[in-house]
Amino acid sequence: MGYTIGVDVGGTFTDVVLRGTSGTIAVAKCPSTHDDPIAGMLTGVTRVLAGRDPSRVTRVVHATTLATNAVLERTGARVAFVTTRGFRAAVPLGRYARVEEDRYDLRFTPPPPPVAPGDCFEVTERVSARGDVLVPLDEESARRAAREIAARGIESAAVCLLHAYANPAHERRVAEILRESVPAVVTSSETWPEIREYERATTTIISAYVGPLMASYLSRLRARLAELGIRAPVHVMESGGGVISAELAARRAVATIESGPAAGVLAAAGAGFADAISFDMGGTTAKACVVRGGRPEVTHEFHVGGKGSFGGRRAGTGVPIKTPAIDLAEVGAGGGSVAWQDPAGALRVGPRSAGSFPGPACYGLGGSEPTVTDANLVLGYLSPALSAGSVPLSPALADKALDRLAGPLGVSRARAAYAVHEIVSASMASAVHVVTVQRGIDPRGFALVAFGGAGPMHAARVAERFGIATVVVPAHCGVASAAGLLAGELSTDRVLTRLDEPDPEAVFAALAGEAAGDLGVRLAAPGVRVLRSVDVRFRGQSHDLTVPWSAERAALERAFFRRYAEVYGIAQRGEVELVSYRVRLTAPLPRPSGPSPQAGPPGPAGSPAPAGSRDAPDSPGSPSPAGSHGRAGAPVPGARPAYFPELGGYAEVPVHTRDTLPATAPGPVIVEDAEATIVVPPGWTVTRAAGGAVHLVRTAASTGSTGSTDSDASTGSAV
Amino acid sequence: MTVDPLTAEVLRNALVVAAEEASIVVVRSAYSTFIVEGSDASAAVLDAGGRLVAQSMATTLMNSMALRTALPELLKDFPPETMRPGEVYALNDAYRGGVHTNDLLVYRPVFVAGTPAYFTATMIHVSDLGGLSAGGMAPLATDIFLEGLRLPPVRLATRDGLEPAVAAILRANSRTPDKVMGDVRALVAGTAVAAARIESLLSRYGEHGLAQGVADYLDHTEARTRAALAELPAGRYEAAYPIDDDGVDPDREHWVRVAVTLGGEAAALDFAGTDPQVPAAINASASQSLAAAVFAIRCFLDPAIPMNDGCLRAIDVRLPEGSLLDARSPHPCGGRYVPIYAAMEAVFQAMSDAVPERAIAASGILQPFSIAAVGAPYWIHLSYDFGGVGARRGLDGPDATGVHFGIGRNSVPQVEPVESRCPLIVESIETIPDSGGPGRHRGGLGSRTVYRFLADCHVTTRGDRLRLAPPGREGGLPGRLGGFYRRRLDGTVERLASKVNNVRFAAGEAFIVETTGGSGLGPPSERAREAVLADLDAGRVSPRGAAEDYGVSPADA
């Protein structure tokens, strides 16, 4: 019998989940240790092992924000950028957009480029869009660049030559020459050979930027796990929800940028609903993603460090990364978001967050501004018995903070608090809107899977805005990402742009072979699956859509026309062309048999109560219960006044834990447990589901609903 | 359900999202080369009173002011009570709110109790609608009839689909009939997406609730605008800015003049004294001049104020009839960006005098050009490169980007897609060292792009600030002048006029676009040494430029 361990290192907490063949599970939540993230991980791993034999751990799966943080905090390696002669200014010039307030800002300064202009170099060569060599590579120019890079003391280089997707020979030769004097060199044709030089260059640059950091981090991690006696392979979650070896993660570090969020979405995908919307709300942001047919939706371009607009990260406001990533929308709205009045008197919430220090006013750590958590406390959704660290939340401080809003607005404290709750729910709904309605997906009929510390408190209100009738709060919803890690299969992606390709089969075969090499599996091995897709567009257009591959041209075109109508609402016909070929290779893992974490009963001995294992002030999203509601085994159902506009204000509402909850109960009800507080408004019924999950089902007819967020997106009435 | 004033922000965001979704559909499903490789589409929500309620985030004011100005004109020809659900209308007439031929404005009414209460609108620069050159530029037009098809308000579609007669007219007047119809379908689909959103808002908030929410939103925006205007120093500030030439007479400059009056909670921008309209393509329609004036003054207000009619109420823009800024038939309007960029610069300079701590020196501007097949079947590359931005108090100007209308560099096409579509090779895209005007704070650099042709083609340009360099401020020096050039097969280089129409290039020849640098602010002698040395490392100044402009020798480093 063996164990697998999932570790998610987040901004505030490091979550660790242990899974065994017998279906037992242990979870630990420890404060993240920013200076040495491995220390926090090891604390958690030791805690979940609780004396078990470390040599029986068969696998450690890791989600890490190392790459993201390196980009956001600009702590990666200094990178030299090498490109075709004539284009060294292209990356420093950038392709930023100016949106919203930037548009009218005469003092706008473009975001700093991912490489300094002085660190950009040129080699003499040129290839055409069809891969023909127009100017042969002048190897002396590459040697000259290598000498200058070395003279500048730069140890990591990214090579991106024009049209290298069509013919990588020059890139490969330049890399060979550079490697004689530069320790780390990556090329665009090995990183992500897709047309459009700017995004291909930034993807390659970011890989060179975070690669050395990732390589040394992962080798230190393995060494320190070995000191604990764990010699199992370390796997890393990549942005697209697949799992890759540590060796590949070091080589293709850019693929791990969205590692953490991807894990959370996999947890939602495992909640038992084929069509689901994952909804993760923490202290500072809320994230949404769509799962269709059990698979998370994937995007082929995202922007790290980008600015959000109504839940979408706008193209041109961050560094574009072309490797596949789970299609997340994120809004700056969480438990710590600060409510404020704009100069014309309108009530706004976020994007500024009180963070974990000083945190919401009710934490008593010196914060005085009203936050979403303060509003939820005033409304009675959060229990005053909850604690932030060792100190109970202070209703008096929350009241005082909300009065700062209510006074100038001329309304009661409760009304101001409910307005904050409603605005933040709408703001989170806009994230859901981006990944559903804007993508041509009708969210009705989907289940909303809520997790994160604050998600279950707002989930029903978000669901109401879309006519969504089912909300699922999984067991262990506070460590969902770590649990999701253990649901991922070994998997990776490859792409190649080839215009007018006469032999797509050969392209796919080569891509599948490379992907198999990446994962270290044989293509013919049992259970290895290859998913082929292709980017298709109408000839003359620039934007393409990815559709599953079909060797039969008519069927492929039909699939494209259908997708086009779904996304744009236009029944267009015309000549189409194929642009890029994609494969996703998935290989099964030797899994411990037995039920999934959600299906198993709570672990007996050695399963630390997460609430008890916290040593620090909690994140604003998820104050932890203390006292009588805190631990399983000490359930005391109770009641407290909570505010529901449907009931005309405050009403005495039953309060349960997951354990005292009857099989089914009508809202309003509040369910509190170690991980989160679930608010069940009037019009909803709460039921206990298998494995400790809780389901909320809408019983009342929708009250007219949905504002920004109604149903059918693509509105067929086109032409 | 009415709008709770506490949560009005929710409705406001929903209105913007409605426009935003329309623009996403248009930009991704359009064919126009101008749109597909860069520029965003524009989309807006208006009410039946012609008030601009919300616009998509990437919509430039040029386009939203056109949509706003043209809607009342549409309603003159088609009274609201004659409109039916499912109908869609279009126009491009510059004298009735439009911009120029290729910018097609499309409207869809949203009905309440059988009457149009709102309009959703989209517009893009479509693939081609005739005129002197493929793609829509006619820099040497002497009247509007040379600029292409002029479309008064027409019913473009009914619930049964496009009106066959209108579609036939559009096709017949386009060099790229299939693409232009693809663009039209994209525009129509965009209005449908936004209309569905407005209908769902109507069902959530009710007729009166939505109307009240919109009214409150406009009032809220007006209040914020007035509050921001009140912080500006009262007074009258005048400035003028020149246009190089009109393309017909290369040596005669034209002037745009403005007097900005600030005081109380309002601003008045009076362009009296601006030179009269000319029979050449450097005039603007009124909607475009309004956009320039509003944009320029907004740059000195809180940038986060929403853009809608509420903002316009606090800003009084006076355009002299029959001037470069309010042309009358049949004066061409296609080159509107030339006079309105001069208008923006004039307002920037007047406001820099008013608020010196936020001063900005004059900038290079975008330089549009088209490259097209000499005959059918047409391929068209329509694009622009940006000049350098002028230095700001305490800040250098950014390199080769848009400061006017806040257009970002993401609208400049990438090399690989262009080369995969057109018979040309882009040899280089570079910043030009020393092109930023020297100063305590340096102007942004201009850029140089070289296109070598693999087939004969036509080149058309619409440049300005290529003869009269953007002047520096407070002792700063002008930016270096750019230009358009032909490199012949023998390697010799010939300078083209700033505005040329269908100049034939032979295969193997190259077209060079150099943009003008932004000007400097403050004396160059006051520039920090470290800043000069950093510029040297980045290649923004050459060793010679460092020595001559700043008296800094690289050896000093």
Image: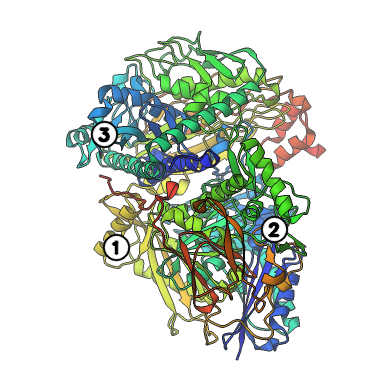
Say which element carries label 1.
helix
Identify the residue under disc 2.
Answer: A77
Q: Amino acid at mark 3?
A: Ser
Q: Is residue A125 visible?
A: no
Say which element carries label 3.
loop
Q: Nearer the viewer, residue A489 or A674?
A: A674
- The image's colouring method is rainbow
Picture disc at residue A556: 1
Percent of width and height locating residue A95: 54, 44
Percent of width and height locating residue A224: 74, 77
Q: Nearer the viewer, residue B557 or A194?
A: A194
Please report, as a chain letter, where disc 2 is located: A
Crowdedness near tag 3: few (<14), some (14–19) or many (≥20) residues, C-alpha within 10 Å = many
Residue A654 as seen in the image, left or right of residue B111:
right
Q: Nearer the viewer, residue A673 or B431?
A: A673
Q: Give the mark toward the camera: 1 or 2.
A: 1
Percent of width and height locating residue B323: 43, 11
Say which element carries label 2.
loop
Identify the residue under disc 3.
Answer: B174
* B204, above or below B374, in the image: below
Question: Residue A499 occupies which quadrant of the picture?
Answer: bottom left
